[in-house]
Every structure is written in C-alpha cells, then in structure tokens.
Amino acid sequence: MGSASSMLTQYDIEEVQEHCNHLFTQQEIVSLYKRFCQLDRNAKGFISADEFLSVPEFAMNPLSQRLLKMVDGLNFKDFVAFLSAFSAKATVPQKIEIIFKVYDSDCNGKVTFNDLNEVLHDLTGSFMSEKQRKEVLSQLLHEAGYTKESSLLLHDFIKIMEHSGLKMEVEIPED
Amino acid sequence: MSKLNTSSSELDLDRPNIEDYLPSGSIQEPHGTLRLRDLLDISPTLTEAAGAIVDDSFTRCFKSNPPEPWNWNIYLFPLWCLGVVVRYGLLFPLRVLVLTIGWIIFLSCYFPVHFLLKGHDKLRKKLERGLVELICSFFVASWTGVVKYHGPRPSIRPKQIFVANHTSMIDFVVLEQMTAFAVIMQKHPGWVGLLQSTILESLGCIWFNRSESKDREIVARKLREHVHGADNNPLLVFPEGTCVNNHYTVMFKKGAFELGCTVCPIAIKYNKIFVDAFWNSRKQSFTTHLLQLMTSWAVVCDVWYLEPQNLKPGETPIEFAERVRDIISVRAGLKKVPWDGYLKYSRPSPKHRERKQQSFAESVLRRLEER
C-alpha cells in the first residue's frame, strides 16, 4: 500500500490480515489504519518515535522506551503484526512471546539476569534500590529453580507464566 | 486532591491527579505470595501502552472530524456544484466587500477617536469599546455567523473574570461583538500580531508567550492588576490554553481561578452543520481557517453566559477550576479529559511515570515482607 494513500484496498487488507495470522478482523484492520494515518503526521508510511511520544498516555508509560525500540519505524503491516499479540484472539503463548521480546532487548533469544533487572528498574524507577531489586530477583529465580547465571529462553517464560491467567487485550475502537 | 507532592516541575502544580480520571482497571492489587511470574508478568503495563497506541483521549481532542460527504449522488452532485459556485462566486465576494467596508468605517473612526480624544479618557474608552464591538460584528457577518446568546449579558464590574472553552480564535470575535472584553492571548506573528499590538492593546489585552516559563509570573501579576482596576474592561480568559475540537474540554489552568474574584463561566458550542469551526493550528494557518469560514454557508453557534461562581470555603483553585470546567462542559455537551492542553507542545512530566513506578515498587516490597 502506498505511503501517501489513505485508502486501503481489499487486497491490502487481506495482505495485512495474512501477515498478522488473522488475529484481527478486517474491520479492526481498517480502524487501525485510520489510527496509523492519524499518528503518522506527514504520511511517511511509518510512525516515528517522536510521533509515538506525542501521545501522552504512551509517553508516561514506564516501558515506553523499550516498546519504542520495537515499534519505531514500522510500516503498517508490521505495526499490525506487533499489535496482534494484544488481540483477544491471540493465544497465551503468543502473548508471552511478546513479553519475552520486551525483556530480550538485544534479540538474542536469551533473557539474562541483567535483562530482568533492567526491566524491573524501568517499572520501579527510583523507588527500589539496586540492591533490593537484585535480591528480589535472585530469591524468586532461586525458588523457581533457576540461578542468577541462568539465561531464560522463551520456553522457560512459557513454563513460568502459562497458568497465571494472563490477560493482555486491547480493544480496537470502531470509530 | 491533597496527594500532590511539592515537586520541582512547575507544570505539575497546575493540575489535579490524572490518576483520578484515567482508567486504572489494569492495576489490580495482586494477591498471594510473590512468585517469579508476578515479576515477569508485565502485561498490565504493556496493555496500557498498547491501548495508548491504539486509541488515546488526548489525540481525540484535537482531531478535526471531516463532515460526511453528501454529494455522492447523480443529482446531489450537481446541487453541490451549484452550491460551490454560489459560495465562492457570490457569497465570498459579498463577504469580502462587507468586511472591507467594516474595516474602512472602523479605521476611519478609530484613529481620530484614539488620538483626538487623548484627554477625555472615559469617553474615548467608551467609543473604542463600541468600535471594537462594531468591527467584530462585521467579522461575524462576514462568515454569516448565526450566534444565539443565552443568559444575562456580561456587566462591567470590578473583581470578576470571564472564562470560556476554546475552539478557535473566532471565539474571541463571537464574544467580543457582544461585550468588549480584554483578552489574554498568545502573541501571534503576522497580521494577527499587528492587530494585537495596536487595537487590542487599547482594550487592555494581555499577551503571553507559551514557550517562556518565566512569563507565567509576569502574566499572573498583570492579571491581578487588571482585575482589581475599577475601570478596566472585563477580562476574558480561555483557561484551556489551546484550541480544542469542541467535543472535549482539556484541563483548565488554575491561573484565572486564584485571583480572588468571581469567575463567570461562558460556554460556546458550534454547530457543525455547515462548517467545523475548530481551528486545527497544526493543519492550517489562521488565514486559511478564516477563508474556509468565509466560503461556507454559515457559522452557527450557541453562547451561554452561566451563573457566576466563587471559590467555595475549603476549595483549592484547582478544584474550583475543575468545578467550573464541569459546569461549562455540561452546558455545551462536551466530554472532559484529564490532559493539559500544553501537552500538544511538550512531553508529559516524569512525575506521572514516577507515580506508577512508586505504586508498583511498594506493592512488590510489601508482598515480599508478607512472606
């Protein structure tokens, strides 16, 4: 689909739907396109980091910088694919996978103690000391059968969080 | 409301707790012993972020909704074409003529009055007020403004300040044609700025500059001086600080509400039947906006002058501002959002993120202790 056009053809919608594994309905893809065009102010075909940060609710989020690395510069197809993990139709392993990707900032498929510490730091800011964070993490890792030196893989994440009743859904407005 | 800590950031003192308004359903209090999965599970935070990407109330405030096209039919289309010809070919030149006549009359009366009556201040002010009201009426006529005023007209009394919701700079013209207010406005470049520094200056208008932080104290002082002066024109303030699309109201700045005087709310609602009066300053210049208005059929709006309000005992200025915003929003049928209009030009302060971080950290530490 052209970056300047603000009209999606049926072929475009089906292509995007294919790319996100049919996790969104065609109507939702049309609504997401409207939103994409709204955020992409000068019709470049992607949304820049600055444009994401102009949404105050997003800028205020503790994980905004990490998410920004994942969504900055995505074209519409990949934008929808990214958001598909938040669809009500997505499976729990798919949702856990995106959580894993947020932790795994260097994209090497392994989440180290350091990665865990950094995300916890994002979430707690200056309200927990480095020492407290490391202590909590070591203790909980140990109880779950891991050590400080272990690198967690995706299937470890799935094992840990599978039955925790994970709910991570976003509703696409009809508009 | 007293949960606000004294923080170094100035902007924060201007508004009440955003968390009171934002949906906090995602942060449920977790129960049970703290486990690894509780720390790994960042889904509430991620859901909020994804939710903000997909839709957020702030962007909605500044969206200009284009009207539904109605000319998609074989007979509607020619009708619409005829309408375009009438609007651009007949109405627009007529309106330009009316406006030109108005300006000629105004300028030829204003300068003599301004310079010749230098000694007779009371009379001069009265005539200048009348002339400004006149030119504003000409402006309103140039867009075929159909304005219905409800409620008692503003009276010139000391220790009162008028506040209104803001959709476009034409709000000022619509209100000014009824009463010659002194307005507090952002200083603009170009021909608007010229008008500001010459004619509007004589009404007692006050200018500010959004981008200068020190500006706020100077402006606050000027406001106070004006309001307490017995002979000054009634002061009009748009506490939102920016133009909003007339479907929502953003947070009111507390500046107008802590002057110790009566606040008279004014609600303005535009009917989008012929044209959308929202001035989307990101998308068009004011001149383009005016031209758009002048080539439409009419600008229809309602203005309600509402009951004057005073600070209630025990109420903070911020609560007072929110109460007045509520009165205006209800009257004009606008939805309230908890955002500061200035976020259009700057990023939110880190204080909001810090609040979330604090509550999460405390929850983790508390559950750790409970084990």
Image (cartoon, helix red, strand yellow):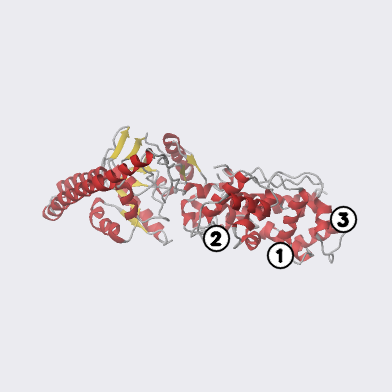
- Image height check: is B134 above or below A59? above
User: Secondary structure under badge 1?
Assistant: loop
The disc numbered 3 marks a residue on which chain? A
First in sequence: mark 3 or mark 2? 2
Question: Of B175 and B323, which appears nearest the observer?
Answer: B175
For label 1, the residue is A105
Same chain assignment for discs 2 and 1? yes
Query: What mark, if any, has residue A45 been given in the picture?
Result: 2
Residues under labels 3 and 2: Cα distance?
47 Å
Check disc 2: other Cα within 10 Å, few if <14, some if 14-19, many if 20+.
Answer: some
User: Secondary structure under badge 3?
Assistant: helix
First in sequence: mark 2 or mark 1? 2
State the image quarter where residue B272 is shown: top left
Check disc 1: other Cα within 10 Å, few if <14, some if 14-19, many if 20+.
Answer: some
Left or right of B114, for residue B59: right
Q: Residue at point 42% right, 43% down?
A: B67
First in sequence: mark 3 or mark 1? 1
Query: What mark, if any, has residue A149 been given in the picture?
Result: none
Residue B325: x percent and y percent?
A: 45, 40
